Amino acid sequence: MTEFIFPRSIPLACALALAVLVVVGLILPDWAMFLATMAFSKGMVALGVVCLMRSGLVSFGQGLYYCIGAYASGLMATWIGISDIFLMSLLGIIASGIVAVIFGPLLATYRGIFFAMLTLSLSMILYGTLSKMSVLGGTDGLNVSAPTFLGYHPEGRALGLSLYMFTCAVIVVYGGLVRTLFDSERGLISLAIRDNELRVEYLGTSVRTEIAVTYIVAAIAGGIGGVISGAAIGHVDPEYAYWTTSGEFVFVAILSGYFSIPAVFLGSVVLEIVRSFSNLYFPNTWQMSLGIFLLIVILLFPKGLGSLLSRSKKPEKKQ
């Protein structure tokens, strides 16, 4: 069993990060607040990709759980009439977790391009299924009613601010838990699997089990991100599971690297800003702008933006 030790520095860092995000949210204009909410929600999904990257795997189908979370919350609000964001998030976690438990052990036996393509195929199967189901809106998707917060029904800017605050709380808490996981025995084993999984097996650890657990953790992050995105936009559709959507999460994961969790959300914010302004000023070539930006980042920071935040001090020279 893995021992989860919660260092004092992590709760303190989480508290400070949440305080800063709350203060920033109070002064942000509406458009920037919406952009930040979407960036943080997608950062949650990208964090799942980063979890798998630590084990040497890349998922090109993270949109599967992004879509599952979005549709689970959307159907809950549309069919049942429950729009509480906490219950919607719980349903997104449960739905994503159940699917991940089913597919995780199977996918954990594959590596490299086979793992990437299998995850992508599962996501595209969901995309094709949802596109053909008229009861779920087909390619048009479903509208999602405005979320409520434990009986509180905000409107206008108060709604955007409430959802932003909720999103900040979620990413800080989940980010702290994932950081604790990374620093634990299981997290260190993930890095060992990336380097040499045969030696990990010799040490008595099941590599397949470790990867399956990591896959489930990544799926839950994707489900929560989908719930928040659906609530922020007010609409869900099969595009959530499309391969280009999953590609965005891989883009953020490469941009941020796997050294720092804050870098994942920073990378997601940077991506949203670059895409928004590129789409505004270069509407026909904004994809090229994103590609050039990614190339520049890879050339300057081959290990991602997180390498800047996690550089260790140089060892002192011996006398």
Image (cartoon, rainbow, N blue to C red):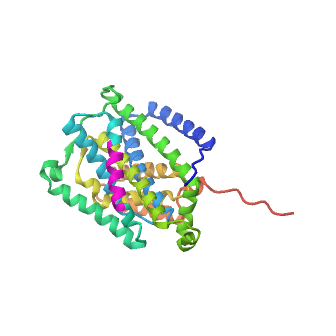
Which quarter of the picture shows residue 48? bottom left
Quick check: 223 left or right of 199?
left
Instruction: Give coordinates of residue 317: x percent, y percent.
Output: 81, 63
Indicate yes or no whether the magenta region holds residue 95: yes
Residue drawn at point x = 27 percent, y = 45 percent: 72
Please tell me whether the stretch drawn in magenta is mainly helix, strand or loop: helix
- Residue 77: quarter of image: top left
The residue nearer to you, when weighing 12 against 92, is: 92
Which of the image's four quarters has the C terminus? bottom right
What's the residue at 33%, 52% (across, down)? 98
> Which region shows up in magenta?
91-103
User: What is the x, y in percent for residue 176?
Assistant: 53, 45
Name the residue: 38% across, 31% down: 162
Q: Position of residue 53 (x, y in %)?
A: 48, 62
Does the rendering let one see residue 286? no
Q: Is residue 270 above or below residue 247?
A: above
Reply yes or no: does residue 57 show up in magenta: no
Q: Is residue 317 left or right of residue 289?
A: right
Left or right of 159 in this view: 312: right
- Image quadrant holding the N terminus, namely bottom right
